[in-house]
Every structure is written in C-alpha cells, then in structure tokens.
Amino acid sequence: QVQIVESGGGLVQPGGSLRLSCAASGFRLDFYSIGWFRQAPGKEREVLSCIGSSDGTTYYGDPVKGRFTISRDNARNTMYLQMSSLKPEDTATYYCASDSLLYNKCPGNTLDAWGQGTQVTVSS
C-alpha cells in the first residue's frame, strides 16, 4: 500500500529554520518524481521543490530559491525539505507528493500519491 507521511512542521520565529520529512512506504522514492507543495488559506497550491526520477533534476520555486534545500535518503526511503530564513509568508500547510503536476519541473514517473500535510507557522 502506497503511503506518504510528512512530519516536522511547527511554529517557528521569522528567520528560523525547520526540516520537514516525507517518509514513503509501499514504493521506492527514487523510482518516482516527488516534491513538496504548500497551500496557505485563500491561496492556490504551489510547487516548492521537487526531485525528478529521470535524472535527479531538482527544482526550486522562486519564493524558496536559496532558502530551502530538498534532499532524499534512499536508504531511509525518506525525502527532506530543509527550510531556513523562514518568513511569515511561508506559513502554510506543506504537502509531500508524487503527482503529475511535477512533470514539467521534475520529469519522471509519478504516482498520484499525497501525504496528509504538515502545518508550518512562521510568527513572532
């Protein structure tokens, strides 16, 4: 059974850091393109970052470029998002997913599988 579980969200002050984890089961992360999305109340869901299965291409959206780093531990079948220099506008629910929405940014196979999300709140 395919399952994705995010963790690591929480409340952090502006300028702080958090590391989100995306643990996968039922499939191998390195066989599929996978990435991080976020959605804030009243806003559209956006792709933040992803890793492509075809050639390991990584992508970062403009709002997080230079501040967030995506990585993958194949032995643990887990993907991470290291977030630093957090801003109040980073407040959102963060989702890990392998979805065809990633294809144009991170080519490769996708699963149409989503985690339940983890809340990140950046506030003083």
Image (cartoon, helix red, strand yellow):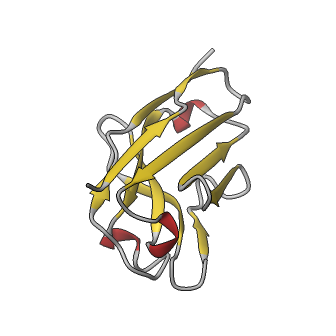
- In this rendering, position of residue 61 left or right of residue 4: right
Residues 7 and 73: in front is 73
Residue displayed at 67% across by 45% down: 82
- In this rendering, position of residue 108 left or right of residue 8: left
Residue displayed at 61% across by 71% down: 58
* Quarter location, residue 70: bottom right
Quarter of the N terminus within the rendering: bottom left
Residues 29 and 55: in front is 29
Q: Position of residue 107 (x, y in %)?
A: 46, 82
- In this rendering, position of residue 123 left or right of residue 92: right
Quarter of the C terminus within the rendering: top right
How many discs appear? 0
Residue displayed at 43% across by 52% down: 24
* Quarter location, residue 49: bottom right
Q: Position of residue 9 (x, y in %)?
A: 52, 30
Residues 112 and 74: in front is 74
Residues 92 and 73: in front is 73
* Quarter location, residue 92: top left
Residue displayed at 55% across by 32% down: 8
Q: Position of residue 90 (x, y in %)?
A: 54, 38
**Residue 92 vertical position relative to residue 107 in the rendered view, above or below:** above
- In this rendering, position of residue 99 left or right of residue 34: left
